[in-house]
């Protein structure tokens, strides 16, 4: 699936409209918590499965969303964190998990 629209909604959600006409929203805290960069993955590994990060408002504010090729987006957070790449399948997976919670 490929997004046809990506935007911030209600200041707390990443809204995605997909090319199959489905729509998903991902809470920004869940998006940040599921960052795939080496630093974030290492932090989760070092702190164990019960680790729950607490983010400041700055850490949950998106400054920019950049397309990475034709398969992913990169997010620049207000705290300058910008190394996580979210491929479209992973975004769909995160949004599906959010529905279950």
Image (cartoon, rainbow, N blue to C red):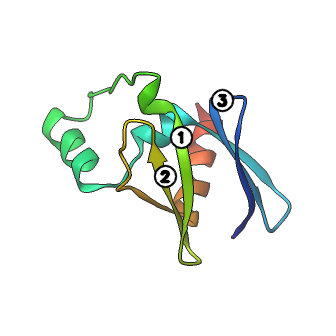
Reading the chain from its start, which is encountered first: label 2 or label 1? 1
Look at 55% across and 50% down and name the residue there: 64
Tag 3–tag 1 contact (CB < 8 Å): no
Position of residue 51 measured from the top left corner of the image (x, y, whole percent)? 26, 28
Up-down relation of residue 56 to residue 5 (above or below): above
- Dot 1, how many residues are within 10 Å of its Cα: few (below 14), some (14-19), or many (20+)? many
* Residue of label 2: 75
Look at 50% across and 42% down and name the residue there: 31
* Alpha carbon distance from label 2 to label 1: 7 Å
* Alpha carbon distance from label 3 to label 1: 9 Å
- Residue that sits furthest to the bottom in the current view: 70
17 lies left or right of 47: right
Who is closer to the viewer here, 43 or 45?
Answer: 43
- Residue 32's disc number: none
Reading the chain from its start, which is encountered first: label 3 or label 1? 3
Reading the chain from its start, which is encountered first: label 3 or label 2? 3
Tag 2–tag 1 contact (CB < 8 Å): yes
Up-down relation of residue 73 to residue 32 (above or below): below
């Amino acid at each position: 699936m490929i997004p046809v629209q990506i935007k911030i909604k209600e200041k707390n959600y990443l809204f995605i409209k997909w090319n199959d006409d489905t729509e998903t929203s991902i809470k920004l805290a869940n998006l940040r918590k599921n960052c795939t960069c080496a630093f974030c993955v290492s932090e989760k590994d070092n702190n164990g499965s019960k680790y729950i990060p607490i983010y400041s408002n700055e850490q949950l504010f998106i400054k920019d969303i950049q397309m990475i090729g034709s398969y992913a987006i990169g997010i620049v957070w207000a705290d300058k964190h910008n190394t996580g790449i979210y491929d479209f399948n992973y975004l769909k997976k995160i949004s599906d998990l959010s529905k279950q919670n």
